[in-house]
Structure formats: C-alpha cells, structure tokens
Image (cartoon, rainbow, N blue to C red):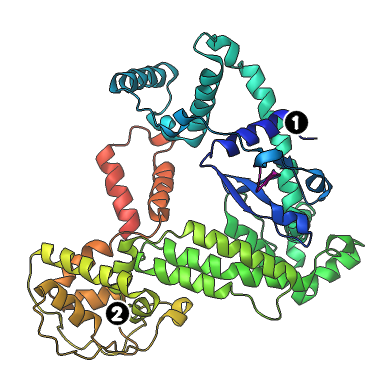
Amino acid sequence: MESDSGKTVVQRRVKDNDPCITLTELLGKSEVLKKFLRVESDGAKTLYAVCKTCKVVLKYTTDSGTSGLQRHTCKPGGGVMQPKITSFVKRKVPVVIKSRLTNTIARMCSQDLRPFAVVEGQGFINVAKELLHIGAKYGASVEVGDVLPSARTVSRHVEEEYEKVKKYVMEEFQQHCIIINLFRDAKTLVTHFKRAGLQKALDRSLKQAVETRWNTRLAMLQSVRDALRSGKLHEVLLHRNELRYVNNIDPEILEDIIHLLEPFDEATRHLSTDQTPTLHLIVPTKATLLRGLLLQDGDRVIVKELKGKLAQAVELKFKIHLYHKIATALSPSLRCFLRKTLNAEEYEEVINTLAAITERAGTEESVRVEQDPGPMATEVHNFFASCVQEEEREEDSGDTIKESWGRQLVLKYMNEPTKAGSQSLLNFWQEMSGGLVPVARKLLAIPATSTPSERRFSVAGRLIEERRTTLNPENVDTLLFLHSNI
C-alpha cells in the first residue's frame, strides 16, 4: 500500500509546479475521470491523480477504480489558499551567495571525487529543491545531521522505491504481458536446446539473445520462427515429449512482432555503417520508421498498442537537427523528399544555411558534372525507397531580385534533375566541382551514430591486451588505422 509520505511529496511537487511533473487527461468511460488529471513524473505515470478544481492529490490506479475519486469533495472556495503578495515577488540571489555556493560545490566534487556535471543532474536539482523547502519551513537553525539520512537509510529506501516502482511498472505492462511472455518463452526454448545439445538436430541453430544488444532478441525470434516453419522443431520436441516448450508461442503474434522490429534492425545497420556517409539518412530513417508504424485496419489490438509505443520512442529518440536536414539536401536522391517533407519556413532555413556555409567555403563556382558517369548502383538503399521521389523542378519565377552567389548555387543544385540509377553519394560528389563540394566533404564525413567510434574502442581493447601493454602508442595508432582501412 502506498505510504502517506509518498503522497505528501507528490502533493507538494504539484503545488510547487515542479517542472518534472506533468498532468494529463484520464481516459475512461466514468464521468468522474473528467474532473481529475493523471500525475506523471519525468514522463512516467504515477499512482496518483489530481483534482482539477482544488489541486488535491488522490491515489488512483486502474485496479483501485474510481471509488476514491467519487468520494472526494472539494473544499469551500475551491480549496485554493489565497497566496501571499510576497509570493509574486521573485527574490534575486546575490552574486556573493551564488559564488559561495559554487565554491562549496567545487570542494564537494574534489573531496568526494564527484563529476562537475553532478550539478546538472535532475536528481541533484530535486535534492536542492527539497533542502530549500526544508530551510524555508524550519529555518536555518536545523542541524544538517538531523536532515540528511545515513547510507543505510538511503539503501533501505532504494529497496522500497524499487519495489514501489516495480509494482507500478508491472501494472503498466500487464497489457503487454503477451509480448513479454513471448520473449520469455522463446528464450526458454533456445536455452533448453543449447543445454540439451539439440541444436545439431535442427537445419538451422536457434540464436541466443545477448542482454546488451536488442537486435539479438530479434535474431532469436527470427530463428524460432524459421525453426517452427520447417517443422523440425516440433519433430524434435515431440520425440522427447517436450512440446510444452512451444505450446505458448503463438506463431501469428511471433510473426507480427518480427514484422514490426525488422525495420528498426535494418535502420540500425544503415545508420551504423562506417564505409559510407550516414548523416543524410537520419531524416528519411525517421520518416520511414514512422510510416511503417501507421495503424492498419487489420492490426491486432496488441500490435496497435506496440505501434503506438514504438512511434513515441521514435519521436523521442530521433531529434532532428538543422544539419541533418542540410545533409539530406546534399543527397541528390533525397532532396525532393526533403522539399516535400519540410514546411516552407524550414526549407528556406536549410537553403539559407547551406548558402551561408558555401559562401564561407570561399569558392564561387557553379555546380557542374565533370563527366556523365552513366547508370550505377542506386545512391540510397531500398529501405528508403518510399523517400526517393520523382523530382519536380521549380520553374523560374522570373524575379529579378539579386541573390547572393551562394544562394544561387544552392538553388541551382536543388533544382537539378536527378538521373534514375545515379551513382553512389561518394562518387557523386567526387565527380562534382564547385562551392558545394567542400561543404559536402565536411558535412557528410560526420557519422550519424557513435557506433563507428565504439567499434574502434572495442578493437583497441582487443589490441592492447595484458600481453601487449608495452606496445608503442604510435604503433597502436598505426595498427588501428590499418585495421579500419585495409
């Protein structure tokens, strides 16, 4: 059962307009739900709802029902206390006080060996707010030792917080227990086949999932699906009287989950390569993933819910920067897609920024192709086929407004028709000349993800092992360079 202290903390955070607290509408058929808002902390749902009228926090979950909300009666006058006039005056902290606090934090980082960035963490900020609240309520005469808990107390509260959050998470994920059970049953099946030495009885061995790599979970599901299709898996288990390992695996749900996750695996591979440019693929990758998550008429309920969660994750994780859009503009096959995706203001910002960068490059030449390379491999993979659209050239409006040479250069490039089956992006810019070339070289050299760098660290870890600790640093650089480029 939820403690009163937890409810009191939430009530105060709501009252103080804590930026980590958000209030969202409660969904349901009951009329009483329209009078309350759900309390969310850092984007996660809590076990509480708040009255729209008096701002009183009440416990509410889908299991507890609405009886507690129906018994609630607002206090006379809306239950809102008249604020003091001093609450409208924002007091400015003197520079001397801020400097003294900064020195104290600097000494704390030195004494406790804490990173400087600890002051920017949301947890540290929440602790600072709590201490300010205690000081404002009880005064400066309070002993610090009476306020700060011991390490054992913190440890005990961490365990309690874990159990509380775990219970909440399990309540939230009950509706997705089918998917959770699917992964669990598939993992149990694969583990059983490995430990029992049954892998050799299958045409293709079952793949084990690695906890730190999500795409290995997809590979595990794919291997189970293929084994079920072949019939060999059922044959082996039937012979051993062990069909219980597959009785709970629904082949249709298995296929639906694989179908949803495969585009994410393919997108990961395209964005993680270190042999070709990737920065220009961020915008079309996000568009392609979201397009694949659109709800269809024949979707199951569980598939619709999973699509919604995945779409939220894509929106949250894919933060589109201006330079992502500019890199997409530097891809001949994707510039038309960019023009149709962005609104007029965003597209104009891309043009103007690219023109400014080009002018800073310091060359005033028109874009031209050195020679016609002829049809070659397509510039982008079929995964982005829906983003490669037929070019629509903009007609010259006849305006006589004088534009900068950089903008003229960019507009000319953006309106150039793209030949079907154009060469790879690297070959395209190698055979171009003009002011855009140095811009493309610099911008498209930026990797879309940190995966290539992480690969280098992994290789370096294998290179500098226990028996090679005396390896010369210059030789390490040389070996790493040769390993990446041979």
Q: Secondary structure at mark 1?
A: loop
Instruction: Mark yes or no: residue 203 visible.
Output: no
384 w.r.t. 221: above or below: below
**How much space separates mark 2 and mark 1, taking CA atoms?**
60 Å
Q: Nearer the viewer, residue 344 or 116?
A: 344
**Which quadrant holds the C terminus?**
bottom left
**Camera-side residue: 191 or 468?**
191
Give 182 or 372, whichever is nearer the viewer: 182
Quarter of the N terminus within the rendering: top right
Give the mark nearer the N terminus: 2 vs 1.
1
| Residue type, numbered disc 2 | Pro
x and y percentages locating residue 218 in the rendered image: 63, 63
Q: Residue at x 15, y 77 (%)?
A: 409
Would you say residue 108 sits in the magenta stretch?
A: no
Answer few, some or many: residues within 10 Å of disc 1's Cα (few below 14, many 20 plus, some between 14 and 19): few
Residue sitting farthest toward the front: 77
Q: Amino acid at mark 1?
A: Ser
What residue sits right under mark 1 in the picture? 3
Q: Position of residue 213 (x, y in %)?
A: 57, 53
Rendered location of residue 293, percent (x, y): 58, 72
Q: Is residue 53 magenta?
A: yes
Dot 2 corresponds to which residue? 332
Q: Which residues are magenta?
A: 48-56
Vertical position of residue 312 compared to residue 341: above or below: above
Where residue 122 sits in the image (x, y, percent)?
A: 49, 36
Instruction: Count every numbered label the image shows and give the total.
Output: 2
Q: Nearer the viewer, mark 2 or mark 1?
A: 1
Q: Is residue 477 above or below residue 3?
A: below
